[in-house]
Image (tube, grey):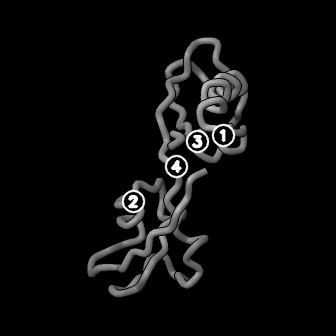
């Protein structure tokens, strides 16, 4: 995965949720593991520096009839491993798609997020 850290300086009126949205993160909780100095997510101060971890962008995949997570991963990897030398795992798919409660239960029309390799 392509990852890098951005240092963001908190401005008056900022919230962790707002900062997360500004950087296209799904939740402010994604900021917490790399910002151990934040003891109360509801209390950040202007001037405080927050690390923002940026990860490879995601693409949208619409589940088709007959798809399983296994076949999606297999086909995705066939297309991308030769081009980019990178493959995706089931754990990564589940991390990108927290809406999947049971990996065996996906349905046509469901939206999945897959990494967009650079």
Q: Quadrant of residue 78?
A: top right
Q: Residues within 10 Å of mark 3 (few under 14, many from 20)?
A: some
Marks 1 and 4: which is nearer the front?
Answer: 1
Dot 4 surroundings within 10 Å: few (below 14), some, or many (20 or more)? Answer: some
Cα distance in 3D space between marks 3 and 4 = 14 Å
Q: Nearer the viewer, mark 1 or mark 2?
A: 1
- Rendering coords of residue 14 (x, y %): 32, 74
Q: Residue furthest left?
A: 12
Question: Residue 83, how many percent across, how many down?
Answer: 59, 31
Q: Residues at badges 3 and 4 in contact (C-beta under 8 Å)?
A: no
Horizontal side of 90 relative to 84 (left or right) equals: right
Spatial CA distance of label 2 from label 3 is 18 Å
Secondary structure of the residue carrying numbered label 4: loop
Cα gap from disc 2 to disc 4, whole angstroms: 12 Å
In this rendering, position of residue 104 left or right of residue 112: right
Q: Which residue is mark 3?
A: 97
- Residue contact between numbered discs 2 and 4, judged by CB atoms under 8 Å: no
The vertical placement of 13 against 107, above or below, is below
First in residue order: circle 3 vs circle 4: 4
Instruction: Name the residue carrying label 2.
Output: 23
Of the two numbered discs 1 and 2 on the same chain, state the one appearing first in sequence.
Answer: 2
Callout 2 secondary element: loop
**Total marks in image:** 4
At 72% across and 38% down in the image, what residue appears? 90
Q: Which residue is mark 1?
A: 86
Disc 2 vs disc 4: which is toward the camera? Answer: 4
Residue 26 visible in the snapshot? yes
Q: Earlier in the sequence, mark 2 or mark 3?
A: 2
In the rendered view, tell whether residue 9 sits above or below residue 24.
Answer: below
């Amino acid at each position: 995965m392509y990852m890098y850290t951005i240092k963001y300086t908190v401005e008056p009126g900022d919230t962790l949720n707002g900062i997360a949205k500004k950087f296209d993160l799904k939740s402010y909780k994604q900021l917490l593991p790399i910002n151990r100095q934040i003891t109360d997510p509801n209390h950040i101060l202007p001037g405080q520096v927050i690390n923002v971890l940026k990860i490879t962008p995601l693409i949208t995949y619409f589940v088709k009839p007959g798809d399983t997570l296994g076949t999606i991963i297999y086909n995705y990897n066939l297309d991308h491993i030769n081009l980019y030398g990178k493959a995706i795992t089931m754990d990564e798919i589940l991390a990108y798609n927290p809406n999947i409660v049971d990996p065996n239960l996906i349905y046509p029309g469901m939206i999945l997020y897959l990494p967009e390799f650079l």
